[in-house]
């Protein structure tokens, strides 16, 4: 709801915004695409971007021509849960890409028989993006940091009451 402040912001979307702000990525006036509309990541991420005056489009399973829509975005947050679905041709040159996904992909060369990949094909997207988060090691640690921040904020509120 516009103008209201929730007690807690979901950790992963909060971490995505924190990354953008820490790297001084302009959000206001930019075109942002969120791929995925879950209640845990996609929808809150879209609302947080909108709250910071981005023009936001949400791509979901019924969206027609998602690659074309995504290719117009200055900021992409991928949270669709599909391994390497977002390819390099989906990315606008110079875009900032935040990959929230974590998927196990079969890899016979790995001792475990699989490797972890995101929703974005990293090598293809990295060739076009100005900034991109890796998987693993990108958004996951930010989610944990935001959980700790939410915990601290909750403890401070509890002490004041």
Image (cartoon, grey):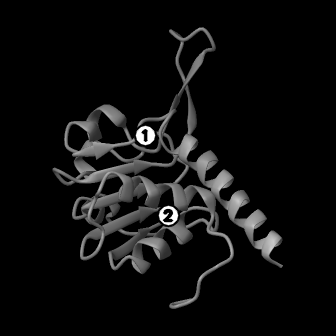
Q: In this image, 152 relative to 95: left or right? A: right
Tag 1 secondary structure: loop
Disc 2 target residue: 61
Residue at image position (31%, 60%) is 75
Disc 1 target residue: 84
Would you place residue 29 above or below residue 144 in this image?
Answer: below
Tag 2 secondary structure: loop
Q: Position of residue 13 (x, y in %)?
A: 53, 61
Residue at image position (46%, 44%) is 119
Going by the picture, which residue comes out furthest to the front?
160
Mark 2 vs mark 1, foreground winner is 1
Q: Alpha-carbon distance for marks 2 and 1?
A: 15 Å
Q: Position of residue 51 (x, y in %)?
A: 43, 79
Q: Position of residue 31 (x, y in %)?
A: 27, 70
Would you place residue 82 above or below residue 92 in this image?
Answer: above
Q: Residues within 10 Å of mark 2 (few under 14, many from 20)?
A: few
Q: Position of residue 95 (x, y in %)?
A: 23, 54
Residue at image position (37%, 53%) is 22
């Amino acid at each position: 709801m516009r103008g209201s402040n929730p007690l807690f912001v979901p950790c992963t979307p909060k971490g995505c915004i924190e990354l953008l702000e820490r790297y001084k990525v302009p959000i206001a006036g930019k075109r942002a695409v969120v791929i995925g509309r879950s209640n845990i990541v996609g929808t809150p991420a879209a609302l947080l971007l909108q709250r910071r005056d981005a023009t936001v489009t949400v791509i979901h399973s019924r969206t027609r021509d998602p690659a074309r829509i995504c290719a117009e975005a200055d900021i992409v947050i991928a949270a669709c849960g599909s391994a390497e679905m977002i390819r390099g041709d989906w990315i606008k040159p110079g875009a900032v890409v935040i990959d929230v996904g974590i998927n196990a992909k079969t890899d016979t060369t790995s001792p475990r028989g699989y490797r972890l990949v995101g929703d974005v094909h990293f090598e293809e997207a990295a060739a076009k993006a100005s900034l991109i988060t890796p998987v693993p090691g990108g958004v996951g640690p930010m989610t944990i940091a935001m959980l700790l921040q939410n915990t601290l904020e909750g403890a401070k509120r509890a002490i004041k009451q």
